[in-house]
Amino acid sequence: MYFSPNAATILHKCSMPINYQEIYTQIKQVGQGAKERRKKKEESQELAQRLLETYSSQVDFLRSKVDSAKTADANIRCAVPLGEALASHYPTPDSATQATLIAADGSQSIADRHSPVQFCVINVGAISMKPNSGETPSVDVESELFFGDAIEENGLTTDGGVALRRDLAERSVIERLSKGLSAPVVSFTDGTLEIFRAKDIDNPSMYRNTVDAYISVLSRLQGRGIISAGYIDKPSSSLVVKLLELTQITIPEEMEKLRSTPPLKYVTDRWLFGYNNKLFQLLPPGHRSAIFKIQSSSEKSYKGVLELHFFYLNVGTQGHPWPVRVEIPRWVVDDHQQLDLLHAVLVEQCRMMGSKPYPYLLHRAHETAVVKNEEKQQIEQLLSMELRKNNEELDEGSNKQSAKDLKGRTRM
Amino acid sequence: MNHQIEIGRLLRAGTTGFIAGCRVNQLDAPSFGALVRAPLSDSYQIYGLIHDIHIDDDGLVRQLVTADGVSDEVMKDNRERRIVPVEMSVLAVGYEQDGKIFHLLPPRPPLSLDMIYLCNDKDVVRFTEKFGYLRHVLNAKDAPIGEVIAAHILQAGKAWKMESGKHVNTEGWIEKVTQEVITLLRDDYPTLMNVLGALADIS
């Protein structure tokens, strides 16, 4: 070890993963900034509260602000109120209706250039349950393997491309499982209803084709009256906060301010709808918020009955609010029975998980779908054996990976 | 052909015993103290006594118990759909080779996924005619010896009774096996008292 004279840095010659001395100093600096951050946050939160109180019922004014902002920047992403006051809330409806619930989740193993064999697996797990029926839920798994040229042809060379394909597969499995089921059927997946274009997707036509296929699936679900939703746990977006921010800027002159110095910078929707909010509580346990439309550039793809909307839902308990965001298409918004059923189902599903509310079926779908490392290795072995059997040349794993795979120290 | 009651498949094995797994809905058949067999071929099978049955929990089950009430559907999902087998620990107590029974440790353990069957009354009577297998139970370190012996004697006693009309000399089997246990444990008073205490419950 030796000491640098100019800084309190100890440079290690032995191999340690982290320079804890450096990290510790930086951590202490983070702590020192806490007071300033708290002050800024509180100021933003107080402003948010005032704006909410002022504008909650001024729905027409808020919509006009969104329209102006859209004209100035078509890519703006925010909430659009329909007719309800922003601070509206609705209790959990009674759900005596017998429904079939379907949840699906996808997992993937993407091609690893360090492996001897390049392949990609997309695995979707789905589980169907009829509450109050006494029937055992049924589980379905759909696994798709991509090898060789098929990886590039399907745009699966990037994480974003694989995620896109996975999202399509999840909704497609729901569509397949819902065939022949009598209404009502409530389906949900983890994540947004909208499928996003990640920055690393470099194939525009592949992206377009996938979105078109997804829209077709959604349309077929709508045609069959299947209630469809996307459940977002611990949402990070601030669509409603962005809406409130529009009231504080002059449009179009100050649009750039929304990006550079947003008026409610330290406020999130999650706080607004209850989490860690010591100023007010909009949503009692089990209550949902008003419905909002999503204003975003993707509205070109999701039109008519597929238009994307959302609401916030407090799936927590008294004193422990846990707001989540639920995305729904317009066909669910327009049918109050469907909306109420979805609301009741999600609250019930979250209650099943006890102290950490999350829809039980979504967790089970995830459990069914997840591709573990040992499974990935088994597939790699099987594929290697098959290729060798058919006299196909195999590559080797990289030396970098081989070194990473070396066992740590052992002790006798 | 005798009706065979499958109770599970082998998960892992050694010379002195093995662990079998089954689904929760197969749990009606196997019971603590039951005599089971694992056929490895037409002429070779291993006999064992079930000395433990357990069901592991996992994170999801632990979280579900914190909820107010668990619905029937969730219970069925966990029992029938989730990959959580019931595990039965079996103590090897002998084997059969070419129709002859040996109360020795088997020369080879069963293999992964070998089917495990419950012994029928005839198999139980054949195996328990002599008492050499008891020493494996009494020497077992991780098994509740008294309880295993008592449960086994209770079940085997019923098998002997069922076979009593079939020209089998069943007279006093329970008394004879109890006497054998006392003889084997004459120098181990604490274990003997433990076993006799358990046997008292079945008399």
Image: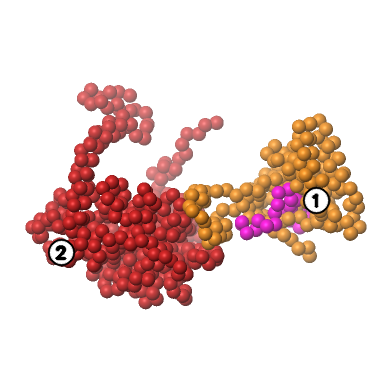
Q: Is residue B107 visible?
A: no
Residue A193: x, y in percent?
Answer: 33, 64
Query: What label does residue B51 carry, if any?
Result: none
* Picture quadrant where residue A327 is located: bottom left
Q: Position of residue B150 (x, y in %)?
A: 77, 44
- Is residue B35 rendered magenta in the image? yes
Label 2 environment density (alpha carbons within 10 Å; few <14, some 14–19, many ≥20): few
- Mark closer to the observer (2, 1): 2
**Total number of numbered discs in the rendering:** 2
Among the chains pictured, the one given orange colouring is B
Chain letter matching colour red? A
Q: Amino acid at mark 2?
A: Phe
**Residue to which mark 2 is pinned:** A61
As drawn, is A123 to the left or to the right of B87?
left
Q: Disc 1 designates what residue?
A: B156
Which residue is pictured at 41% across the width and 55% down the height? A358
* Image: magenta residue range: B23-44
> Which quadrant of the rendered structure holds the C terminus of chain A?
top right
Q: Whole-percent x and y of residue A324? A: 34, 56
